[in-house]
Image (tube, rainbow, N blue to C red):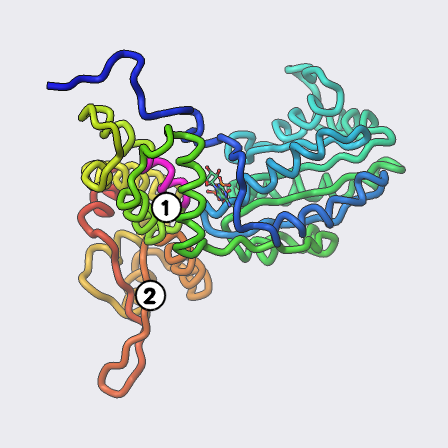
Amino acid sequence: MRYLRWDETLFRNYEVFDEDYLPEEYLHRETQLNRLVSNLKPALRGARPVNCLCLGPPGTGKTTAVKLIFKDLSEFEGVIPVYVNCQIMNSKQQVFAKIFRAVYGYEPPSYGVPFTKLYYSVMKGIGERVLVVALDDLNFLLSEEVANEVLYALLKAHEEVEGVKVGIVGIATDVKLAARLDERVSSVFHPDEIHFPLYGFEEIRDILASRARFGFYPGVLSDEALDKIAELCYEYGDLRFGIYLMKLAGLEAEREASRRIELRHVEAVYEGSRRVFLKKSVQALSDHERVLLGLIYSSDELTTGELYRRFKEMTAVGYTKFYEMLSKLESIRLIDTRFEQRGGRTRAIIKRYEPALVLDALEEF
Ligand SMILES: Nc1ncnc2c1ncn2[C@@H]1O[C@H](COP(=O)(O)OP(=O)(O)OP(=O)(O)O)[C@@H](O)[C@H]1O
């Protein structure tokens, strides 16, 4: 029996498959990159940039686009680009502490600094430079009202401290985010909305092929395996899933001491990786969204009307909110809504994907 030598591997660079790896090639998003560049360009002249919001379903390249642009920006003197992940830094204090670090190059005092003091020291420290703040996963701050406070504090900076220039790049999966901000913020925040739609099959295949070129040795990934990964990833929408699947298929091939990743390796790891991803998606939902998903997955087939009636009985949530939740579940591909003709009437029918796996993922909550 053949076994792998200790130094034998299919992976040329394992890091290429990491969650926060910045790819060498960023494909099929020229329009979005151009919009970001043209909006942020005024910063290079020392002027306030145009605020933007990058919106789209998970795994469509929003974070990557902004990180690549911010990497370029960091080369320019006079611009302070700061990237904040709001899922991790989820208070006003934490967001501004991160900005403080970028402005001064050292930590702010960790105890007993009132927010106003931290805020004004940040603004004074900017001086003639231009601060550009990316707020990733902005929707995470929204339920707590923190998003409104952070945005308001940044939007009002130039009125609070004369001459201060601040630009904002928000990133969110909720395409209606701007409409959900409070009046005080929306009256002064008119961002350029840059949309990141789901990738088509060919685009996904190209991106995954590029990732494989940097991650595996030449010829390791068979065409059949690549096609299958692209097909499964396309169904799911999130590119992160395709990249993860490719990594697991590589490990599976190594486990078999195979020199190539074949279709069977992808098939062997598909269900396990899908479980991991579903669990993450379900974990990221709100309690009400999970109740709704549970209702959908515990019946065979439902019309939207029937579903709303049952959901309302349990939660007293209104129709607009219900509809928003349904669209969200659809945009992250946990459900599918189709129109069907029955008895001379057109009805919206909700379809489920892989019920056994989704119900397992829901069971953990
Ligand atoms: N156009 C692209 N070219 C190369 N790699 C890409 C592209 N788009 C996305 N990716 C890769 O897909 C993965 C997910 O992308 P990213 O994190 O940017 O998505 P996102 O839209 O910000 O997702 P979320 O909303 O869940 O944060 C990353 O590994 C990223 O490198």
Horizontal side of residue 35 vs 282, given as left or right: right
Query: Which comes sooner in the sequence, label 1 or label 2?
Result: 1
> Compared with residue 60, is residue 112 higher up or lower down, i.e. above or below?
above
* Tag in front: 1 or 2: 2
Q: Is residue 159 visible?
A: no
Q: Quadrant of residue 240?
A: top left
Residue at the image position 36 percent from the left and 25 percent from the top = 11
Residue 70: say if magenta: no
Q: Secondary structure at mark 1?
A: helix
Q: Which residue is mark 1?
A: 287
Other-residue count near label 1 (Cα within 10 Å), few / some / many at <14 / 14–19 / ≥20 = few
**Tag 1 and tag 2, C-beta contact below 8 Å:** no
Q: Amino acid at mark 2?
A: Thr
**Residue placed most toward the observer, 222 or 158:** 222
Q: Is residue 217 visible?
A: yes
Q: Confirm if mark 1 falls within 8 A of ligand 1.
A: no
Q: Which residue is mark 2?
A: 337
> Compared with residue 182, is residue 81 higher up or lower down, i.e. above or below?
above
Residue at the image position 45 percent from the left and 31 percent from the top = 214
Other-residue count near label 2 (Cα within 10 Å), few / some / many at <14 / 14–19 / ≥20 = some
Numbered mark located on residue 279 in the image? none
> Compared with residue 16, is residue 342 higher up or lower down, i.e. above or below?
below
View extreme (top): residue: 6
Q: Which residues are magenta?
A: 239-246
- Please provide percent x and percent y for residue 91: 58, 32
Q: Amino acid at mark 1?
A: Asp
How far apart marks 1 and 2 lie (CA) works out to 21 Å
Residue at the image position 53 percent from the left and 32 percent from the top = 22
Q: Secondary structure at mark 2?
A: strand
